[in-house]
């Protein structure tokens, strides 16, 4: 291919990360993918020897990130695209879920992604070019009972992503928050951390949500390979969006949320305006 790029993707062992890496490799790009164990590293590099490079990283090891990025720049090539994909869902009623689980959720989904961005930015600024994709979620716009910590982390990443985009656009760096709906990955299966139930008062709002999520795991509407193609289109675009929603389920839920918010803003408009002056 004429202009192969170097993509750095966190979490390429399964799901979106794996699908995007495969698609990018098939297109002719180089991919550095992070994984958490030697067997996954070997399997990843075997995808396309010489163009698929694995690096071991737990994104909560924040001190390891800057040297890792520096090493990739020095030995493999300039990182044209960072994809902050590594993440997981914590499921549990907020009152029942211990605070350390919230810290862990933010450590991976927010601080890990922020540390990655801070590590690549000096290199991208020096080149006046770069792309950052942050995989957030429809849960970064809409909420439902039982995933308060997850939504909190994805709202945070949406906000950081949007603000950073405004800081670096004039430097030739584009930041896109990618918000998928429900996709057939390991997210609701092996990767999900589920807090045990303890307070009966929440049975009515939470139990049906947990049960439904377990039932549909593996049968969700979204196809990760199609998401990978959409993400590559964003990477190739001269004018990428600051937000990209993936999946008709996410689109419908987010549109409903915006309409509800507009209605609430109007209903309380007089009180809102009453504090000026
Ligand atoms: P997945 O198949 O479970 O993949 C998650 C990936 O993240 C795995 O490679 C996992 O590595 C890695 N990871 C998790 N914690 C990590 C850590 N501390 N350090 C480094 N890597 C870590 O699920 P997925 O759906 O593809 O998830 C990718 C992203 O999409 C996540 O940010 C998720 O929140 C988001 N998302 C998913 C959906 C959906 O419906 N699937 C919807 C919206 C957003 P290991 O194999 O080592 O665990």
Image (spheres, helix red, strand yellow):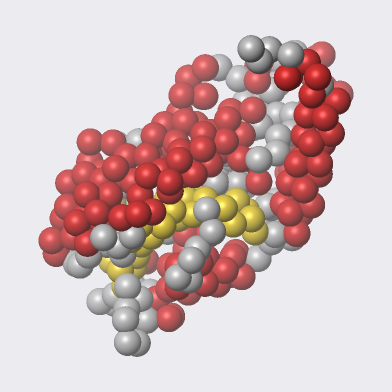
Q: Is residue 117 above or below residue 39?
A: above
Q: Residue furthest left?
A: 74
Question: Which percent across, then down, holds residue 157?
Answer: 49, 39
Question: Which percent across, then down, holds residue 48?
Answer: 34, 77
Judged left or right of residue 243, residue 23 is left
The N terminus lies in quadrant? bottom left
Judged left or right of residue 16, residue 38 is left
User: How many tags in the picture?
Assistant: 0
Residue 51 can be seen, yes or no: yes
Judged left or right of residue 130, residue 228 is right
Q: Residue furthest front?
A: 277
Q: Is residue 198 above or below residue 113?
A: above
Say which of 68 and 15 sits in front.
Answer: 68
Question: Which percent across, then down, holds residue 21?
Answer: 43, 67
Say which of 137 and 238 sits in front.
Answer: 238
The residue that appears at 73% across and 19% down in the rendered structure is 272
Residue 194 can be seen, yes or no: no
Q: Is residue 204 above or below residue 57?
A: above
The residue that appears at 20% across and 67% down in the rendered structure is 77
The residue that appears at 30% across and 68% down in the rendered structure is 6
The C terminus lies in quadrant? top right
Q: Residue furthest bottom?
A: 1
The residue that appears at 35% across and 49% down in the rendered structure is 168
Question: Which percent across, then down, holds residue 108?
Answer: 43, 37
């Amino acid at each position: 291919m004429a202009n192969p790029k170097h993509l750095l993707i966190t979490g390429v062992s399964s799901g979106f990360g794996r699908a995007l890496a495969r698609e990018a490799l098939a297109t002719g790009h180089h991919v550095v993918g992070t994984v958490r164990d030697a067997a996954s590293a070997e399997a990843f590099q075997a995808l396309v020897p010489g163009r698929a490079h694995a690096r071991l990283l737990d994104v909560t090891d924040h001190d390891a990130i800057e040297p890792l990025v520096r090493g990739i720049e020095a030995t493999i090539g300039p990182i044209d695209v960072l994809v902050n994909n590594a993440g997981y869902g914590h499921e549990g009623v907020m009152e029942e879920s211990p605070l350390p689980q919230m810290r862990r959720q933010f450590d991976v989904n927010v601080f890990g992604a922020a540390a990655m961005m801070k590590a690549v930015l000096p290199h991208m600024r020096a080149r006046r070019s770069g792309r950052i994709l942050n995989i957030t979620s429809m849960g970064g716009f809409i909420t439902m009972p039982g995933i308060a910590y997850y939504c909190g982390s994805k709202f945070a990443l949406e906000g950081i992503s949007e603000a950073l985009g405004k800081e670096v656009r004039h430097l030739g760096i584009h930041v896109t928050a990618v918000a998928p709906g429900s996709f057939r990955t390991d997210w609701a299966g092996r990767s999900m951390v589920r807090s045990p139930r303890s307070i009966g008062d929440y049975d009515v709002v939470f139990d049906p949500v947990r049960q439904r999520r377990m039932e549909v795991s593996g049968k969700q509407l979204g196809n990760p390979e199609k998401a990978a193609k959409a993400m590559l289109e964003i990477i190739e675009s001269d004018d990428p969006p600051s937000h990209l929603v993936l999946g008709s389920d996410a689109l419908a839920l987010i549109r409903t949320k915006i309409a509800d918010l507009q209605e609430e803003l109007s209903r309380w408009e007089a009180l809102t305006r009453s504090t000026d002056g």
